[in-house]
Image (spheres, rainbow, N blue to C red):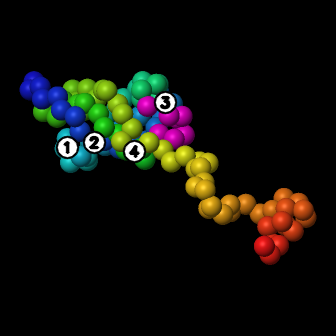
Amino acid sequence: MAIDYQRTRARVVRAGIETTHLSIPAWCDGQITVPVLTLNLMAATVLAHDDLPGTELVITANLAAVTDTDVDPHAFQVDHPPADPMPRRRRGEASTKAPTSAGASAFLFSRV
């Protein structure tokens, strides 16, 4: 068996309870998915199970492998951190929330 470990990109195709399947474009053009333990992937990326599908990763894998079990993906890192669900506003930027009381409405819509 040839061994050629390299850093490469991968994408989570399916996340099961025990096994998650990765597509690795640099190995078999990503056509054959590679199984990894879901708990290992969640621990390494600090992502919840529901956040895994579609996640882009950077991994280390044996790209000279002949079978999916010899690819041995590890050293998982999220390629792009997930977007902050509550991004901070910049000074002077208007809020998208509607006013919560009549007093707030009067203040927001009054002329200066």
Determine the residue located farthest toward the right in the rendered image.
Answer: 102
Q: Secondary structure at mark 4?
A: loop
Whole-number angstrom distance, CA of label 4 to CA of label 1: 19 Å
Residue at image position (77%, 63%) is 98
The residue that mark 2 highlights is 9
The amino acid marked with disc number 2 is Arg
Q: Quadrant of the C terminus?
A: bottom right
Whole-number angstrom distance, CA of label 3 to CA of label 4: 13 Å
Label 2 near label 1: C-beta < 8 Å?
A: yes
Tag of residue 80: 4
The residue that mark 3 highlights is 46
Q: Quadrant of the N terminus?
A: top left
The amino acid marked with disc number 3 is Val
**Is residue 50 in sight in this rendering?**
yes
Looking at the rendering, the stretch of residues picked out in magenta corresponds to: 45-53
Residue 25 at x, y percent in the picture: 24, 46
Which mark lies nearer to you, 1 or 3?
3
Mark positioned earlier in the residue sequence (1 or 2): 2
Q: Secondary structure at mark 1?
A: loop
Mark positioned earlier in the residue sequence (3 or 4): 3
The residue that mark 1 highlights is 26
Whole-number angstrom distance, CA of label 1 to CA of label 2: 8 Å
